[in-house]
Amino acid sequence: MIRSLQRSKAYSFSFNIFIFLYFLFLFAPLIVTMILAFNDSMFPSLPWKGFTLDWFFGRGPEKYGIFHDAINLRSIYNSFKVAVAVTILSTVAGTMAAFLFEQEDFKFKNLLYFLMLAPMVIPGVILGISILMFSNTVGLFLEDVFGIYVKLLSPGIPLVVLGQFSFITTIVALIIIARLKKFDRTLEEAAYNLGANRLEVIWFITLKYLRPSIIGGAAIAFLMSFENFNTTLFLVGPDATLPITLYLQVRDGSTPVINAIAFLLIVVSSTIAVINLYSGKKSTY
């Protein structure tokens, strides 16, 4: 579309209708889900039967709100633990990978870049199954040959962290690499000329410049880890994360407490996204 060309009324009308339908399709399910979190009904669906806060603060015996639901609270805590661990590991590894790919004399850059992108194009289901089979094979080998039982290789939180880390770190690395390509290397040279050593240059110059992308990558890693389902489904043990718990509740039948959880997640995720966007714009000035 050439913006300088004059638009007809039919084109402008069609364009506005398309934009309206697009955002309606995008946000209508979220809005309905958020509204149903306050529905005074025993089912997480229409019809509307009145306003209530019981699905947030209810103590029973019929309506247990999310803040008094031990199972969902435990799953939220498990998801939070996994997300924090994956965020730390992915941010550190992604930052180091970004520095590695900016080295011009690195011989195997293209091969390593391809291998780094591989987990992103592999379906999460296949990735989860592959990690599970690999860990089981290694665990059985160690137990049969050496008589050693390694609990970390069995389904559980550590294996979930490993599975999510395998592809989320790639996304963090790509975010940081994109900003690092715009970095002015003369700033480092100036710091060297002023007597700074390599560590000081990286800490006070390079990492300070990369701080918005590092924070943004960490925020994306946290959100992706918190809501991951495909890979986690095959690696989780008895300590289920929130997506797994919600899936089981929806499959077996649940109350609108799942709408209350969705409401809180949408609000928190939107808040993190807005803060990240605002901090990113502020750092450019």
Image (cartoon, rainbow, N blue to C red):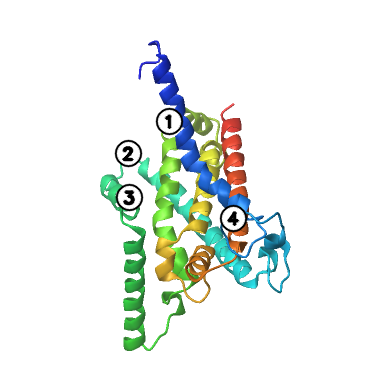
Report crowding for label 2: few under 14, some 14 to 19, many 20 or more residues within 10 A (C-alpha): few
Which element carries disc 3, helix, strand or loop?
Answer: helix
Position of residue 47 in the picture relative to residue 101 (left or right): right
Q: What quarter of the picture does the C terminus occupy?
A: top right
Q: Which is more N-terminal, label 2 or label 1?
A: 1
Q: What residue do we see at 36% from left, 41% from top?
A: 103
Pointer 2 or 3: first along the chain:
2
Residue 268 visible in the shown view: no
- Could you say where residue 217 lies in the image, as x and y percent from the top left? 50, 46
Left or right, residue 112 beside residue 10: left
- What residue is shown with label 3? 117
**Of labels 4 and 3, the one closer to you:** 4
The amino acid marked with disc number 1 is: Phe
From the image, state whether disc 1 or disc 2 is nearer to you: 1
As drawn, 109 above or below 260: above
Please tell me whether mark 2 sits on a helix, a strand or a loop: loop
- Kindly identify which residue carries mark 2: 104
Residue holding disc 4: 47
Other residues around mark 1 within 10 Å, as few (<14) / some (14–19) / many (≥20): few
Q: Amino acid at mark 4?
A: Pro
Q: Which residue is denoted by mark 1 in the rendering?
A: 18
